[in-house]
Amino acid sequence: MATMSEQPGNVFGATLTRRQFVKTGGALVVGFSLVGTEILKADTPKSAAMKNSLDPSLPSSWIEIHPDNTILIRTGKNDFGQGTTFTAYRQIVADEMSVPFEAITTVVQGSTDATPDGSGAFDFLGRGDPNIRKAAAYTYQALLDLAAERLGVAKGKLTVKDGIVSGGGKSISYGDLVKGQQLKLTIPVAGDLTSIMGLRITGNPPMKPVSEYKVIGKSYQNSVIVSKVQAKETWATDVRLPGMLHARVVHPKTLGSTLVSAGQVDKGKFPNSQVIVKGNLVGVVAPTEWEAIQAAQQVASGTKWTEWKGLPGNAKLYEYLKNDADWTTAPVQKGNGNKGDADAVLASAHKKLSATYQFPYMKHAPIGPTMAVADVKTDGTVHIYTHNQNPQELRGEIAMMLGTTADHVIVHAYPGPGHYGRSNGGNAGAEDEAVLLSQALGKPVRVQWMRADDMQWSTQAAAAFSEIQLAVDEKGKMAAYQVDHFMPPMQDDRPIGAVLAGLPTMPAPKADNDRITSTINGVSDPWVYAQVPNVTERGHGTFQVGQKASPLAVGLRDHSMRTPVQFQQNYPRELAVSEAAALAGVDAIQFRIDNATEERAIGVLKAAREASRWDTRPSPRPDAVATGSKPVHGRGVSLMYRNLTYWACVCRVVVTPDTGAINVEECTMAVDPGIVINPAQLKRQVEGGVVMGVSNALLEEVMFDESGITQDDWISYPILNMSDIPEIKVVLINNPKVGTYGGGSEAPNALVASAIAASLHDATGKVLRRIPLKPAYVQALLKA
Amino acid sequence: MATITVNGVKREVHAPGDTPLLYVLRNELQLIGPQFGCGLAQCGACSVLIDGKEVRSCITSLSDVAPNQEITTLEGLPARWAKQKGLSAEEAKHTLHPVQQAWIEEQTPQCGFCQNGMMIKATELLESNPHPTIGQIKEAFTTAGVSPNLCRCGTYTAIIEAVQHAATIMAKGR
């Protein structure tokens, strides 16, 4: 039996305690203590949230070292196809702890009762300093302390290789250091578990110098792929609980309809089905999935809703945003790079551009519509089985909906179809509906949205428009840049089932909500042209389109989608900068280099220029032509700084003026993330981002009438297919002197549209300042 | 009650005849390779092979499948390859279908949700055309079937590379 012994040891602010004389096993378990003002101020529900996840005496720890030298790591973040938790996280831990990649045998992620820190799958690398890295750094220091004591050698004289500590002619493995003991390392954290950012590890444990990295920088494989390609992985879609019922939801007729009367089940046809109504939430449940689908269709046809017409319709979207939306309630935001007097320079400039750029609503469009299984127990405990980017925040939202505390809600995380940001603020759509139906029936319920539900009732990326004015001087440089970005709120985290049922949620978007869910539109695209002397960037926010007019207060609900807000702001900027280069008569890449100072920005531009065999000259090309059936070639460039990574993109396109068809032949992406953790995985992420970007740029636009979204399938909302992909060249620039890991899965999708639009200008001499670059829109431009 | 042949085994199933095969496979036979993507035969996530041809199980009624027709799901790909190559039972246990092996070695999936259909399509293609060109691969995954096979993560490049790699593995017969 264990007996407590010894005083706790201090490890750079962390605390190491031990119980010795364990007969079998033993482990070093890294947990944490709760410090920091945010935690101390946490109210009761937040404290209760920690009961299932955060009690350090429970096995919900970050890192466990076992006597057989294997290591387990845990993270509240949940893989969405980036593979980061299975590759980069292992590599980071391996190098911080001086163990081989293979020593980390288990990765536990996402589930709220089995992981420590929360937050979403949008920031795996934690702006260069992810929790898992600090947890590993603390653990390494604790292991050195233990070894120093055991070997009788000063800590500073120890060396570690492959998990074996040596010094003074002696050595011992990590496994032997922890064998026979129960060691618990308690490390400091701060933050709010069920918020979007979750908990973060504080303090400053020494980190491994980059020069000592052995595992980071190599292309290790993603272990979860092995089980996924063999159908051996349990997906959220595969979860089946005893007595579980299948459900479909009959969503309202419009985004502002309320229920008049729910249809009845035809018991002759569907004897085992039943209708559950809660406010405006109508669910149909049955023991088998096929009966639930058919019964829901039959019930839907007999369900009556009020009519509602409160949307402008997509044809009048920008007119509405410009003239009718209320931009006065959210304070105007200013860019960090603002300087000089752009107004004055623009007033007297002789070469000047003044233009408006339009960005449509886009769908996340996961290949599988959202679904979840919920099991509300008689004691009020709620279990949710789902695919979610931020399970801890979902917990908080479900607890709020039910009027309970988060310790009653456990979210079990499983793989599922990527949905690119839709649930990084908690819910994806079906979880809350499953909970309400399970609560009503006292049985586990599986809610699966159909394709039309996912197109019409999920959130989308916000539409936007930007008004840009810029001036170029006699020397061909940018003299002034001014932009006003206008966008409805990008993040509505209210669960839609709770809204329909009339149950508590966080408030609808408004100016004084928490920053992320407020109507305030910040300037999110870091300014990269430091040589420009006069810069004014402003962000203007408003309510969701339709929100104020809808009895449900929902309208066109928006939610972060891959490179959120920065896509909406970088696209207009980069197209405008290409236009500025043309105005100045300077090559578009050289113009960017001439207006930047940051070496890494210039580096990615030069790398993209070389890899794409860029011919330096001004745009449009000398033989640009906007008419005829003969295809004409063009090329364009874009630049972005996001999440510690510099990106440059070059596209080459072919335009057929008569039809307006654009074929993207080639896309080159140069990436400088600082330290490249895993080249092969990063390359795949970039390729995927490019494909999504071409899809966004050429095809994607949410169509809606005055009542709701009119697209309901893959024909009406097409995405890119394999035939239309460009040849993709990825240039990875490993830049270890930067010392941080930049993000790699966002950004590429957002760089493509502006580079294609600049290519169209290069080819034809005409600029289309809206996306998507659909043939009809391009044709209309070229004929004008 | 109906009888279908799935992955080489005759199975009795109880679902009504108008039930889409997808729900029979997933909910009654616990074969989870095929996924529900659209229910409209527009994406390919639910694909299976029926007598070697790629079929969308979301719109194929149970009653449309004859008892002697061979349904192969993702789970059945290794055995399908083992049978084609005449591998022993012991060898077969440790052998993946070359398409699966290539998908791992090329690190093709991202979220992986569509990849069932992609691997089924690749198997169909390579069984009839052991050395497809890039143009033929693109054709197979877009215009040849009832709809394009859609991937939202954008893994098309990785799929093309994996199909070519699988062709190499198959040619070697390992």
Image (spheres, rainbow, N blue to C red):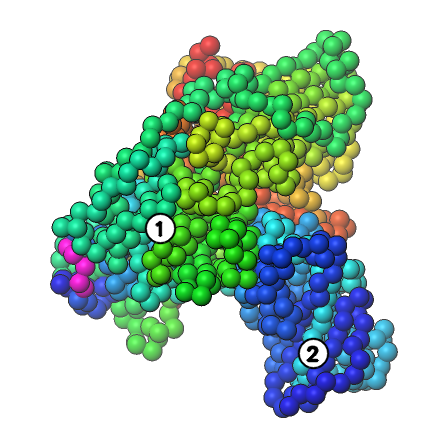
In the rendered image, which quarter is residue A203 located in?
Answer: bottom right
Q: In the image, residue A214 lies at what x, y percent?
A: 69, 64
User: Which chain is mark 1 on?
Assistant: A
Q: Against A20, is A371 above or below?
A: above
Residue that appears at 40% across and 33% down: A255
Q: Which residue corresponds to the image point at 13% horizontal and 58% vertical from the top-left?
A: B66
Q: Is residue A607 magenta?
A: no
Q: Give the class, few, some or many, for how many residues have Cα within 10 Å of label 2's Cα (few <14, many ≥20).
A: many
Note whether residue B25 is visible: no
Looking at numbered disc 1 in the image, what kind of residue is underneath it? Gln
Could you tell which of marks 2 and 1 lies nearer the N-terminus? 2
Q: Is residue A74 above or below residue A266?
A: below
Region rendered in magenta:
B13-17
Where residue A510 appears, as percent x and y from the top left, is: 59, 33
Against A144, residue A233 (above or below) is above
Q: Amino acid at mark 2?
A: Leu
Which numbered tag is attached to residue A183?
Answer: 2
Foreground pick, A401 / A371: A401
Quadrant assignment, res A605: top right
**Count of labels in the image:** 2
Give the SS element for disc 1. Answer: strand
* For residue A580, side relative to residue A660 (left or right): right
Query: In the displayed structure, does residue A535 sit left or right of residue A108?
Result: right
State the image coordinates of residue A583 (x, y, percent, origin top left). Answer: 66, 15
What's the residue at 47%, 22% (across, down)? Answer: A317
Q: CA distance from mark 2 to mark 1?
A: 44 Å
Q: Which residue is mark 1?
A: A448
